[in-house]
Amino acid sequence: MPRLKPVKAEKLIKAIEKLGFKKIRQKGSHVSFLHSDGRTLVIPTHKNKPIKVGLLNHIIKKDLKISREWFFELL
């Protein structure tokens, strides 16, 4: 399995939308998403800065509840 590297917010948002999350609002530089099963997710979209590995790992494991292999397939 390849190492997890920082990912730009735009690329992460496309992967999240493939999983069925819908953008519900944006306040400043944070975008909120909602899944049909009730899960919510907030992604920071700061000026072209990639999302750091620690936060990305948390999003994959705790918020999306998918494996890292599946995440790499979505990208």
Image (spheres, rainbow, N blue to C red):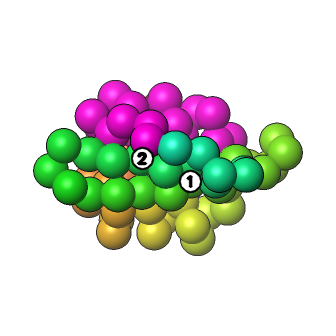
On the image, the x and y values in percent for residue 51 come to 67, 55
- The answer to whether one can see residue 7 in this image is no
Residue at the extreme right of the image, as rendered: 47
**Residue under the image location 27 percent in, 34 percent down:** 20
Q: Residue 62: tell me if it is visible.
A: yes
Rendered image: mark on residue 8 = none
**For marks 2 and 1 on the same chain, the one whose residue lies earlier in the sequence:** 2
The kind of residue tagged 2 is: Phe
Q: Few, some or many C-alpha atoms within 10 Å of disc 1 (few <14, some 14-19, many ≥20)?
A: many
| Residue behind mark 1 | 43
Which residue is identified by label 2? 33
Nearest to the observer: residue 18 or residue 25: 25
Instruction: Please indicate whether residue 19 sits to the left or right of residue 10 in the image.
Output: left
- Is 75 situated above or below 51? above
Residue at (58, 33) in percent of width and height: 11
Tell me the residue at 73%/52% (across/down): 28
Q: Are marks 2 and 1 in contact (CB under 8 Å)?
A: yes
The residue drawn where x is 26% and y is 57% is 39
Quadrant location of residue 36? top left
Secondary structure state at the residue bearing disc 1: strand
Q: Is residue 50 left or right of residue 24?
A: right
- Cα separation, mark 2 vs mark 1, equals 8 Å
